[in-house]
Image: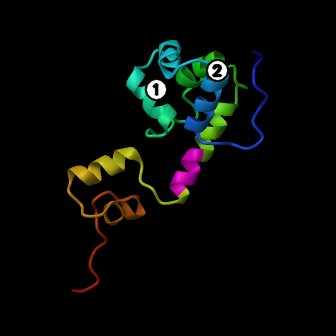
Amino acid sequence: MPAALPLKDPVKVGQLLRRRLRELKRTPRELAEAVQVTEDYMADLVAGRRRPPAPGRSDLYAPMTKFLRLHRNDLPTCARAERAAAEAAGRPTPRCAARCWSCAHPSVSACCSGGSHGRRAPSSSG
C-alpha cells in the first residue's frame, strides 16, 4: 500500500493511528514494537487516553510515520492541533492534573487556574 497523502485537516492523533492501523491491517502491538515503546503506552495513545507526545518528538514520530506510511508532517501537525485545542479548552496538562489529585484539590480548575498549581492569589481583605 502506498504512503498516505498529506492530511488536509488535522485530526486527533489516536484517530489517525487507528485509521492507518486498520488500513494497513496492523495492530497497536506491532506499532509499539516498531517505535520501541511499551504496548500499554501505544494502546493508550491509539485509544486517545494519553495526550500525544510533543510535536518535536522525532524519536517517536519518525518511526511511527515510517511504519504507518504517513506524510512526514502528519503526526506532528495533528499533535500540535490536539494540544492547542486542549489548552484552549482549559484542560490541565497531565502533569498538573496528577499534582491536583495528589494534593487533594476538590477541583482541578481551582488548583490549576492561571497555571499556578496550588498557589492561590493573595486575599484582598486585610
Residue located at (32% from left, 66% from top): 110
Residue located at (41% from left, 63% from top): 114
Looking at the rendered structure, the secondary structure element under dot 1 is helix
Q: Is residue 30 found inside the magenta-colored segment of the image?
A: no
Asked which quadrant contains residue 9, the reply is top right
Above or below: residue 9 compared with residue 105: above
Residue highlighted by disc 1: 42
Where, quadrant-wise, is the N terminus in this rendering?
top right
Q: Is residue 11 left or right of residue 96?
A: right
Q: Is residue 83 found inside the magenta-colored segment of the image?
A: yes
Residue located at (62% from left, 16% from top): 67
Above or below: residue 98 compared with residue 118: above
Where, quadrant-wise, is the C terminus in this rendering?
bottom left
Q: Secondary structure of the magenta portion, mostly?
A: helix
Residue highlighted by disc 2: 68
Residue type at mark 2 is Leu
Residue type at mark 1 is Met
Question: Along the line of sight, which residue is nearer the eye, 32 or 21?
Answer: 21
Q: Is residue 109 left or right of residue 36?
A: left
Q: CA distance from mark 2 to mark 1?
A: 13 Å
Asked which quadrant contains residue 41, the reply is top left
